[in-house]
Image (tube, grey):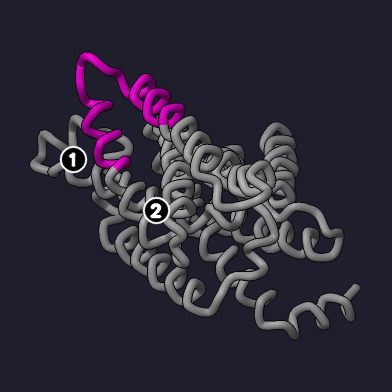
């Protein structure tokens, strides 16, 4: 097995996949803690469906680099979703459901009506559940992922205290002068960036798992915000690496394998938490 892994890691595309996968897992876990505590978990699911619609539009337009179109669409959707969720007439969960279902239906319709491929069903399935495209990622896409991940990490570290206060007591944070609306918007934009990056890794339907499972697993063992954040980051990176290795050796779908490893890890952490 070690010889097989050494052989695979001698190829640049495998190393690229590991770099991208670990960075995406790390960013997803860091933001996931805040989203879970603020009960915004499904915003990731909603934005992933919007990203699917963006990919459908990019495919119809025959764009070679789909991220150029998908990223701004998803970021704008995050802003609209946040503003709509604050509307008293449309509650947050209803706004997520409305935008996510609409984007998913629109994307599927575009891919069928303006099909540029002979295998529409295969394209849709790979976009929704992920595929081996992570193993064919190009050097430019790797550097773009590294740059965007670095931005997410730097912003999270710089505004850690503000995000902490907005997460636990938004009313108090607003009372002491913190611009909570700005930081909620920052969270939404960051998670939109992470979701676009994660599309090639796990697909649009499985992205929420990268956000939710590490945070919930860490909460089984730790109680402080800092401890949960650190544990979630380590958990997510280890599970992503293990999932990629298993996927390469066993030939299983990358996204589904990583999520399965996350589920097993959550079960283990839950048992340990019960014993403690």
Secondary structure of the residue carrying tag 2 is: helix
Circle number at residue 70? 2
Question: Is residue 69 or residue 176 the one in the foreground?
Answer: 69
Q: Which residues are magenta?
A: 77-102
Residue 160 point in image, percent of width and height? 31, 55
Circle 2 packing at 10 Å, graded few (<14), some (14-19), many (20+), is many
Task: Indicate left or right for 157 with 44 as reference.
Answer: left
Circle number at residue 180? 1
For the point 31% across and 41% down, the residue is 78
Secondary structure of the residue carrying tag 1 is: helix
Q: Determine the residue located farthest toward the top in the rendered image.
A: 89
Decide if residue 16 is in sight here: yes
Task: Indicate left or right for 267 with 3 as reference.
Answer: left
Circle 1 packing at 10 Å, graded few (<14), some (14-19), many (20+), is many
Vertical arrangement, residue 33 with respect to residue 131, above or below: above
Q: Which quadrant of the figure has residue 178?
A: top left
Q: Is residue 84 magenta?
A: yes
- Mark sitting earlier along the chain (1/2): 2
Decide if residue 213 is in sight here: no
Q: Is residue 2 magenta?
A: no
């Amino acid at each position: 097995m070690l010889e097989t892994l050494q052989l695979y890691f001698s190829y640049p595309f495998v190393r690229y996949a590991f770099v991208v996968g670990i960075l995406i897992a790390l960013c997803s876990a860091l933001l996931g803690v805040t989203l879970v505590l603020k009960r915004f978990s499904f915003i990731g699911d909603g934005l992933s469906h919007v990203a699917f619609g963006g990919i459908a539009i990019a495919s119809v337009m025959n764009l070679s680099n789909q991220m150029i179109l998908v990223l701004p669409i998803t970021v704008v959707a995050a802003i609209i979703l946040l503003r709509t969720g604050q509307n008293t007439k449309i509650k947050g969960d209803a706004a997520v459901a409305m935008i996510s279902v609409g984007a998913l239906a629109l994307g599927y319709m575009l891919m069928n009506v303006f099909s540029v491929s002979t295998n529409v069903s295969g394209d849709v399935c790979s976009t929704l559940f992920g595929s081996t495209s992570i193993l064919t990622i190009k050097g430019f896409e790797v550097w773009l992922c590294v740059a965007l991940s670095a931005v997410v990490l730097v912003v999270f570290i710089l505004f850690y205290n503000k995000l902490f206060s907005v997460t636990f007591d938004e009313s108090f944070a607003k009372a002491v002068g913190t611009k909570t609306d700005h930081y909620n918007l920052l969270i939404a934009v960051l998670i939109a960036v992470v979701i676009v990056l994660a599309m090639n890794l796990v697909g649009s339907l499985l992205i929420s798992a990268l956000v939710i499972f590490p945070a919930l697993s860490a909460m089984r063992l730790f109680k402080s915000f800092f401890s949960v954040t650190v544990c979630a980051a380590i958990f997510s990176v280890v599970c992503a690496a293990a999932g990629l290795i298993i996927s390469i050796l066993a030939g299983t779908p990358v996204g589904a394998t990583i999520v399965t490893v996350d589920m097993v890890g959550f079960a283990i952490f839950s048992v340990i938490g019960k014993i403690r």
